[in-house]
Each structure stands twice: as C-alpha cells, then as structure tokens.
Amino acid sequence: MHARVIKPEELGGTECESWRELRAESGAPANPFMEPEFTLAVAAVRPRARVAVIEEGGSPAGFFPYEKGPFGQGRAIGLGVSDCQGLVLRPGVRLSARELLRCCSLATWEFDNLEAGQTLFLPDSDEEFGSPVIDIGGGFAAYEEHLRRHAPKFHRTTAAKERKLARQTDAGALRFVFDERDPAALRTLMEWKSAQYRRTGRRDRFAQDWIRALVRRLHEIRTPGCSGVLSVLYAAERPVAAHFGLRSRTVLSCWFPAYDTDFAKYSPGLILHLRMAEAAASEGIGMLDLGRGAAEYKDSLKTGELRVHGGSSTRPGARAALHRLSREPVRRAHSYVRDRPRLAQHAQRALKQFGRLRVQ
C-alpha cells in the first residue's frame, strides 16, 4: 500500500472516475458530500484542501479528502458545513488510521459528521448522533400515508396552512420550483439564513466568505453524483421559502433551509419540504437526508435516522495532546448541555434572547 498527497485540483479524470466507482462499491447511501465534486468545490475556496490517493498494485484503492492546518492539525473537508465525511476505500485494503495520518503528515484529523460504516475512524469517535431522513423510495403517496398514520396533526395542519397561504389575496397562487437556477433567488436565501442565524443567536455561517463562495460554486455544478439544488416556494411570484442542498441520483442532502418571516404563520418552510419530497420522488430520489441536529420539524417529517459520529483521530505526540487539550473542554460542555433536555431548552432560550439583542 502506498499513499501520495496531492491538491484536489491535481486529480485526473481517471482518478475521479475511480473515486466514484469505489464509492459506489461501498454500498453506502450515495451522499453527494462524499463525491469528488464536493472536494473540488471546497478546494477552490479552501487552499489547504488535500487528497491522499491510496494506491495498491499500481491502481487507486482509496481517496481521503481533508484540510490541513498548522502544526499538523487536520479536519474533514469542509468541516463545519459538510454533512457526511470519511474515507473512500476499496473493501479489503489493510490500513489503520494512524498509518493514514502518518502518510498525510497529520497529528490529528477532526470530524463531526463521520458516516456510519467508516470502520477506520469509528473507534476514535466521541459522540454519536441521529441524522433524520425521509424515505421516499416507495413514492410520495406512500410517504404521505406514513405522515397520516404517524403525524396526523402535523399533516393536517400543514395542508391547511398551505391552503390558507394560497387563498390570501396579497399572496395569490403558489408556485414551486424544485431546481431554481436564478442567482438572485440564492442571494435571497442566504440573506434569510444570515438573518435567522443572527435572530437565534447562532454563528452566521454566511458571514464567512468561503462558505458563500462554496454555495455559489456548488449551485453551478451539474453532475450525476453531486449537483446543487435550489428549491423555492413562490406566492404571487414572491419567494416565501427556499432551500439549498446537494443531490446525487438517489439522495438529496438537505442543507440550508430558510423562509420569509413575513409569512411565518403559514409555516412556508414545512410546505416547501413537502413539495421538495414530492418533486424529489418524481426525480427518482429515494431519500432526503435532513442532517443532524435537533429540530421539531425534522421529528415531524422524518421516517427514520442514519447515524453519524463526531470525534478526532490522533497519532501519539505533543501536537495531538495539545489538540485534545484545546478541544476536549468545549466538546464536553456541549455534550453535557445536549444530553440534558431542560438545560438545553434554557440554553436555546438564552441564545434567542442574545439574538434579539444583537439584531436590535
């Protein structure tokens, strides 16, 4: 086994095709975050992005995308926004996490959405999370029937709000676009999302230039394994809710949803998600991955969950120890709050109060 480290843009067409083939052979859900196109898009805005090409018998046997920081600190490609992380590796290849980190000159590799089945790194995970999903493999009608049985009040209420929104004289007819290509609509979504982050006291991801640039770049990508999809719900040609995510042939990874707060009483975001599920099913997509993180709307929409993991792999040494010392107190504090619902509710209220003060 041999590994060589290159910049993602140095990947050749044959290597990218080998990456896709190895990923398909894994049997894991075809998550677009695990495709080479996502790594290439991140590399265009994150100059420290790298890929370790693992070779066996003179041919590619694996690909490990990552970002390398100072002092050998590594992180998952696009950490902070990527919803599925890990190594693409041919089954049967003998490799350890420490060997891989040594090949990449990394002391640590941090992840927060490691997919299930990543046996190389799972022993190093500190936390496990549920990532809610919507199974639409049986068609949208079957999913609607699931909602009627398992979330009847949610289904009735959302349908009623959609009818009310459509009846409003100042709103007019509703129109849904599954794959909107207008850049202006994307700008509107990012403005809504930034306002939501500030309103709820959270870090505004779209205040970071690289994230805005990454989303704009992904919106332009059109490949079978990874395409940016902007879905918009219009009322009288005015956008009232939007979502930007990534899709493969069979998976839509939900990423950035937001809505116009002037229409909040109609729950336009929920209406949008149901329209998205319907359109995705008609496109042959079998699953919507709503992403990790607690949210009431996810509990209502989901049919099941995938498992993802957070943690870091390390090689023994002073640099790894320093990484642990800097990260562990924060991780433990987050876990402590998250595992205590009442405390988590108090923290949520405090964040919202901070957000209100910040936007005044």
Image (cartoon, rainbow, N blue to C red):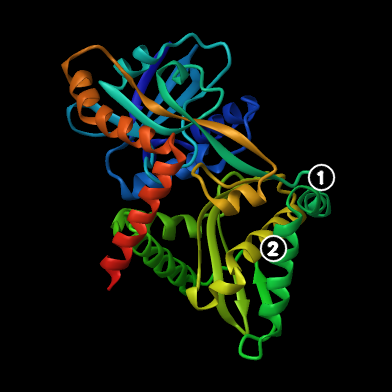
Q: Which residue is mark 2?
A: 275
Against 94, residue 177 (above or below) is below
Q: Amino acid at mark 2?
A: Arg
Please, what secondary structure does the residue beneath circle 2 have? helix
Against 236, residue 352 (above or below) is above
Sequence-earlier tag: 2 or 1: 1
Quadrant into which the N terminus falls = top left
Q: Which mark is residue 138?
A: 1
Q: Quadrant of residue 322?
A: top left
Q: Toward the viewer: 161 or 288?
A: 161
Q: Amino acid at mark 1?
A: Gly
Going 26% across and 66% down the picture, which residue do you hit?
Answer: 358
Please, what secondary structure does the residue beneath circle 1 have? loop
Q: How many marks?
A: 2
10 Å crowding of disc 2: few (<14), some (14-19), many (20+): some
Quadrant into which the C terminus falls = bottom left
Going 50% across and 37% down the picture, which residue do you hit?
Answer: 84
Against 186, residue 80 (above or below) is above
Would residue 66 be visible to someone looking at this image?
A: no
Q: Quadrant of residue 270?
A: bottom right
Horizontal relation, residue 90 to residue 323: left or right: right
Residue 149 spot, x, y in % from top left: 81, 49
Residue 301 spot, x, y in % from top left: 66, 51
